[in-house]
Image (tube, grey):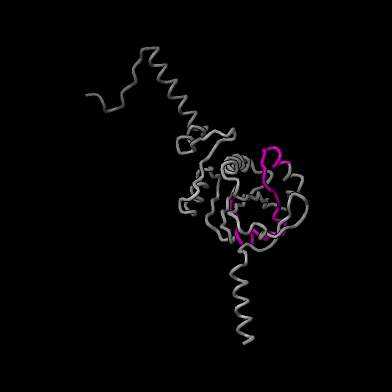
Amino acid sequence: MSTILIILMFQAFNVNAYSISGQYLSEDNNYYSFDKFQGNLFIIDATASWCSGCEIQLEYLITLKKSAPDIQILSLSIDPEYDDVSKMLKLKNDNGATWEFGIDENSDFQNQYPVSGLPSIFLFNEQGNLIKKWGSITPATEIAKAINEYRGGQSSIELADNNGNTKSEGLIGELVKNPMFQFFAIFGLLTLVYFKVTGKKEIPAEGSKK
């Protein structure tokens, strides 16, 4: 009878156990267990203070956080040999982030979820189970879409920009912000203006003459 009771207690403990184990060094110089986020949808933003692309990711996360304040975020440096608390606080303050920053001091997180590139975004459910991972700069729309799908379409996130205005970050929006797209768009416009002003016609492609 006692053996059965022990087994049942062990199973109950496992059911309630948080899936992300270990600790991290927080911005206040204290160590915390990942299970402090239990019961919440939770994002780990794998980052580093020297990563320029990570600052772009922070902008997207700021947009997401303003639109979905219930989502918990931890920006976690995966380079403990370079980063310290002061560098992470500078990264946080310089970019206007409002959530917690920390360092994967003993690689507890990376030993469970390897990080292949920066930035990387990990979305976990309330029990710490991985919902989705992205291994590059990820727009807020992509993260919000995954959250909405997990919630079954309930409590849909309507994104707003950093000024509180509703916006769309779809493919067109991403193209407009892309430097290469901007270059070719300007080049094409100038070409059209040139031929319009000079009255010259475009040279027909070879083989197009009859």
- Magenta segment includes 55: no
Q: Residue furthest bottom?
A: 1
Which part of the image, by quadrant, shows the N terminus? bottom right
Q: Position of residue 148 (x, y in %)?
A: 49, 50
Q: Residue at left 26%, top 26%? A: 208
Question: How far across and down, in percent of the image, does residue 46 sit?
Answer: 63, 51
In the picture shown, does residue 11 fall above or below 113? below
Q: In the picture shown, does residue 85 fall above or below 37?
A: above
Which residue is depicted at the point 50% across and 35% down?
167
Drawn side of residue 110 relative to residue 210, left or right:
right
Residue at coordinates 56% horizontally, 44% vertically from top-left? 137
Q: Which residues make up the magenta segment? A: 90-118
Left or right: where does residue 68 sit relative to residue 192?
Answer: right
Residue 194 x %, y %: 42, 16
User: Given the current orientation, which residue lies at the most extreme left position?
Assistant: 210
Q: Quadrant of residue 190?
A: top left
Residue 56 percent across, percent down from the top left: 60, 39
